[in-house]
Image (tube, rainbow, N blue to C red):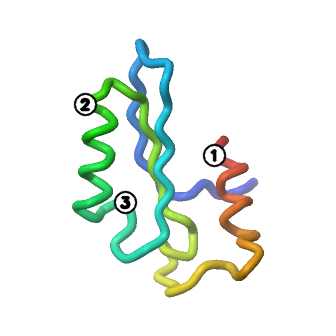
Amino acid sequence: MQKLPNFQYFFNNSSDTLDVILHGFNEGMKSRFIQKVIAKAKSYNHSVVAFNFPYLDRKDDHSSGEKLIEEKKCIKITS
């Protein structure tokens, strides 16, 4: 079984729009900036999913490398 990344999700039943917010820097989706982005998307009545890439949750300071294998895998799991 594949482990899902930590994520936040807001579902608006009347929305045809899903905003996907991927994050891999600094405080991740807990940052004030990302929380403002999420709030703005919700204010437009969009559904929103936001998540950190796994390396950020592990407290690593870099991605999985030039080919971004882990990040692509993470996006595939959540789509």
Dot 3 corresponds to which residue?
A: 29
Quadrant location, the N terminus: bottom right
Describe the element under mark 3 as helix, strand or loop. helix
Residue type beneath disc 1: Thr
Quadrant location, the C terminus: top right
Q: Is residue 15 left or right of residue 77?
A: left
Pointer 3 or 2: first along the chain: 3
Whether the residues at callouts 3 and 1 have beta carbons within 8 Å, the answer is: no
Q: Is residue 45 left or right of residue 17?
A: left
- The residue at 26%/41% (across/down) is 39
Q: Residues within 10 Å of mark 1 (few under 14, many from 20)?
A: few
> Residues under labels 3 and 1: Cα distance?
16 Å
- The residue at 47%/38% (across/down) is 19
Dot 1 corresponds to which residue?
A: 78
Q: Is residue 42 left or right of residue 3?
A: left
Say the numbered circle drawn on residue 32.
Answer: none
Say the numbered circle drawn on residue 43.
Answer: 2
Query: Where residue 21 appears, x then y in whole percent?
Result: 46, 50
> Residues under labels 1 and 2: Cα distance?
23 Å
Residue type beneath disc 2: Ser
